[in-house]
Image (spheres, rainbow, N blue to C red):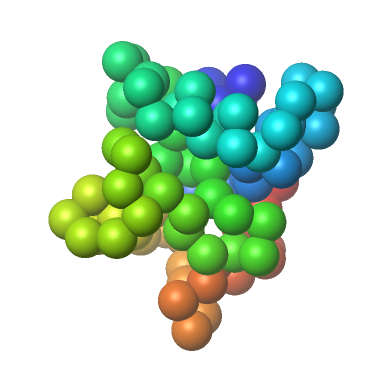
Amino acid sequence: MTSQIPKGKVTSYSAIAKKLNSSPRAVGRALRVNPFAPMVPCHRVVKADGTIGGFGGEVAGKKINEKVAMLKEEGVEFRNDKIDKKFFI
């Protein structure tokens, strides 16, 4: 499913979970061990409130900064540390 998220857009863990009849935490756990990143763009999955969530098993620090940088490089914009809702699909 993450492969279908276009560059410059994001979706939430909960949106993916709903489509898979699963839980957001299960989605996060699966993405944490994604061996195909960034070809399978797990960096485009964030929390439903627009905050980053985790990345590579971390919720703070260098990996989160990498996720933010990757999203910004794709044109995703942030307002007060949250992703602008216009970037959600």
In the rendered image, the vertical position of residue 25 relative to residue 71, given as above or below: above
Residue 74 position in % (x across, y down): 38, 50
Image quadrant in which you'd find residue 86: bottom right
- Residue situated furthest top in the rendering: 35
Horizontal arrangement in the rendering, residue 25 relative to residue 16 (left or right): left
**Extreme-bottom residue of the structure:** 80
Q: Is residue 20 left or right of residue 53?
A: right
Provide residue 2's location: percent of width, then percent of height.
55, 26
Q: Is residue 51 above or below residue 18?
A: below
Q: Position of residue 58 (x, y in %)?
A: 31, 48
Q: Residue at x 23, y 49 (%)?
A: 63
**What residue sits 38% from the left and 20% below the top?**
34
Q: Nearer the viewer, residue 4 or 12?
A: 12
- In the orientation shown, which residue stands out farthest toward the left? 62
Above-or-below relation of 77 to 28:
below
Quick check: 39 left or right of 30?
left
Which residue is painted at 59% across and 64% down in the image?
Answer: 50
Number of marks in the rendered image: 0
Q: In which quadrant will I find the N terminus?
A: top right
Residue sitting at x 66%, y 38%: 24
The answer to whether residue 66 is visible is no
26 or 39: nearer the viewer: 26
Q: Is residue 47 visible?
A: yes
The x and y percentages for residue 55 are: 36, 44
